[in-house]
Image: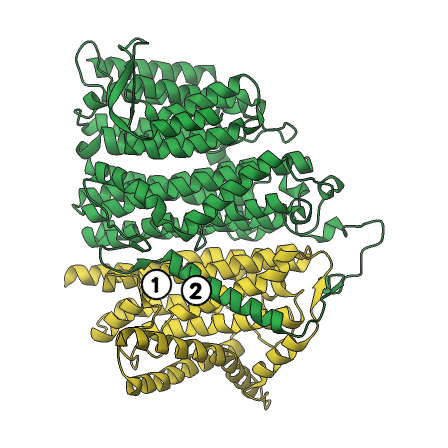
Chain colours: A green, B yellow
Amino acid sequence: MAGLVLSALGLAGGWTDPIAVPLGPTGGLYWTCDALSALFALVLCAVGATAALDGGPPRLPVAIWATVLTPFAADGFTLVLCFGLAAVASRGADPANRPGIEQAACGVLCLVAMVALLTPPGAPPNLRFAAMRTVSPEGAQATAILLLALLGAASQLAWPARASLQTEPIGAPLPGGVAIASLYVLIRVLLDLCGPAAPGWWGAPLLILGAGGAVLGGLRAHAEDDLLVILGASRMGAAGLTVAGLGAALAARDADAPALAALALGGTLLHVVSYALADLLLTLCAAAAMRGAGTRALSRLGGLIRSMPGVTLGAMAGAASLASLPLTAGFAGRWMMLQSLLALPQTCGIWQQAGIAAVLAAVALGTALAAAAAVRLIGIGFLGRPRTPRTAAAAEPSHRVRLAVAGLAGLCALLGVWPSFVLLLIRPVVARLMDVDGARRLLVIPAQVDGPGYAAPGIAALLALCGLLLAWLARSRAGQEGQRVPAWDGGLDEPPPWLPFGDPATQYSAASASQALLQSLGCPGTPRQARFQVAKQWAGKAADRFCRPGAGGLVGLLLVVVGLLLWGAW
Amino acid sequence: MGRVVSGVASLLLHAALMLVGAPLLAGVQSRVRARLLGRVGPPLAQPWRNLVRLWRKRPVLPGPASWLFEGAPFARLSAVVVAALLVPSFALGMATAPASDLLVLAGLLAFDRCVLALAGYETGTALGGMGASRTTLAAVWAAPTMVLVILLLTTLTGTSNLQAICAALLEVPQGLAIAWLPAAAALAIVGFATARRGQGGPPLASMQDAAALEYSGPALALVVLSEQVRMLVWISLVAALVLPFGLAPAGAGPLAWGVGVVAWVAKVGLLGVAVAVLDTTAAEPAMARVPAALGVAAALAFLAAVFLFASQGLA
């Protein structure tokens, strides 16, 4: 697997002339590596290497290779082949993920139709990216392309299916990797292949859908019990933010504000990179918690900070980044995206301004919900008292896993304190997609070229100084040893001796931690809750329909794809 | 060079003022509360004496608490103090001016809330969990309002840097009362619904107190001090944005600083007393009402933003 990483890193060095491998129906599989490919390949290599850490069934390497190779594709056929293989194989490798395999197949079919729409007319069809860039989509064709690209990405990102809690996850990081790959496909199609010819109105639906996805994903992450489903839901929230960021970039470009578009796109890419790392770290910690403590249900975990200190520290680093707290990897990208949204109203009329204000409020709510979900994940899953005897006897994972956790946590911390370091990698991508050269500042991320901005190293230095001063003060206090006593617990009696970890019923549970927030959307017994339940059931049914379309749905979709292919050829 | 020296000097003076002033403000507020209830009230320096008394006590830790529980008060106070260093009190152009971004400030205050919630869960008690979940609830519903108010300020001044915003508000007379009224109301509701109440009152006087109930001794001193500094940060922020007059401009001399200090003390005293009066005369909103109140705040902030856009479109 080290070889895999090395080869991919070598590839990331970059070449722009596509290499053809004479295979397949369209004259060959073309491979290339531009700045965008290199950026995503780096991230996906990390995912692939982590997924390969503890082996697995024979289908796993196929999924890993397909995921890692997706960003290198240089023609439509290769792109869909790699992505489809990655999507289907990563679902197939893990029995727990099987319910999602039809959903993945639907998404791939959508992408096939999209590629057909993007192919320039003529025989034989030329599927290479260079040819696709000459097509300028308009009208119904543009609508169809946007819809199909979003559906293809959503098949990997939206509404994670609940799996049985009994099965052990295999290749747990892979769904996250495929999600990142689907974001890559989205960015490649919407910003590169459609390029400057992309219609300006694409910004609005992307902003609205993205903000909605961020709120829904955050809410679901706050309500679920299974660690992996929580991570899947927060993946949906993060993808929503990404889509909103792309919408902001497109809207700014449409309004002829290239610097703003570059800020939005840079923030989005930084968000994707930092999110991918945090998600990978948390997935690794969740899998370790499951192996160590025998469950991945929040309602049975607890107290891992004492039995698995290393994993808990790693999970906290990942969750802090997910919660986009300052000085974490997640904050810088979020900061840039929010800055671009804050400046966007200057470029448009009153109706759009009001819409952008609403989107901004929704994005803030989604971010806060993601933070709340991260706090609940750590607070219930890793802190407090163990909720079952099995959890109390949890053991740290193997050295390899601990090393991977430490490495990823270190990378997250580095990105948090010095985010401009990743912007060095992102700048060429932004320069190519938006035709702007971003600001070159090593220590500060500016909102405008010369203006002040987010000075992460400065804030970190101030925080460290304060913390050291306080620690010094505490140390210089008379050397009294701390005394341990039973928790006061509101005056409750000490637990009886046959309950060594206290009465489990007196500790806040996973459900009670999310209750206050969910109740605020509709308290039990009020008409509001009934409405919320109906809406939830309706949304769940629609999502289930998309997840499990059944044979009829698949055939229907196939017919639609064939129709679109015919339309494209005609 | 002179600018750097004056920036560092004003920052040091500002830090001292904030740290000394936060417990004093709490003292003034509890005195006002007591007077309104017909009592004499404690001396103004009582919060300081309480802090010193707590700091000298022997640390006591609840049963299973880990390093996170012990470290949380240090992390919280550090975050709140850094937030306090970013908010201008008497002068602009402090050494932290280039870093004083409003989103960073909001993030630091959110960090404080997250660590508080984690420490609440870490105690493994029902009350700790309840306080943590309620803290999260209030923080989540406050987020949209905060960002909408930042949108308002960014649209007005073209930047989200707090000190640059204050400088711009000082230069340009505020011809935006119509947009400011709902925005100030929204900020007031957020402060009222999320701030810790009843300092020095009985335990569980506030919905968020519960998360920090297991602290005692020196750790409790840090927790209390960080709540007091947080209150002062909020009040100084509102004072700098709504009543920016008296702020010494960047690079001003000691005379302007003196005027600034006097103006800051007057503004903070006025707003602090107003908060105490509101505290005593109005009941704390019931838990179930907090999201609704914060929803109203978000709607007001949205209204303010639309007003501002409309007035800019007309101009």
Say which of A499 and B283 sits in front.
Answer: A499
Q: Amino acid at mark 1?
A: Ala
Image side of residue B142 versus residue B211, left or right: left
Image side of residue A284 versus residue B84, left or right: right
Q: Residue furthest left?
A: B315
Q: Are marks 1 and 2 in contact (CB under 8 Å)?
A: yes
- Element type at mark 2: helix
Image side of residue A102 versus residue A483, left or right: left
Q: In which quadrant of the rendered view does residue B203 lie?
A: bottom right
Q: Which residue is mark 2?
A: A462
- Element type at mark 1: helix
Asked if A183 appears above or below A556 in the picture, the reply is: below
Q: Residue at coordinates 56% horizontally, 31% vertically from top-left?
A: A162
Say which of A203 and B302 sits in front.
Answer: A203
Labelled disc at residue B99: 1
Q: In which quadrant of the rendered view does residue A250 lie?
A: top left
Query: Where residue B31 sits: x, y (%)?
Result: 54, 86
Query: Where residue A496 sits: x, y (%)?
Result: 84, 54
For residue B126, say whether it is visible: yes
Say which of A249 and A14 sits in front.
Answer: A14
Q: Amino acid at mark 2?
A: Leu
Image side of residue B63 versus residue B5, left or right: right
Crowding at mark 2 (Cα within 10 Å: few <14, some 14-19, many 20+): some
Give the chain of mark 2.
A
Say which of A236 and A319 sits in front.
Answer: A319
Asked if A284 appears above or below A377 in the picture, the reply is: above
Give the chain of mark 1.
B
Label 1 vs label 2: CA separation? 11 Å
Query: Where residue A298 sits: x, y (%)?
Result: 63, 42
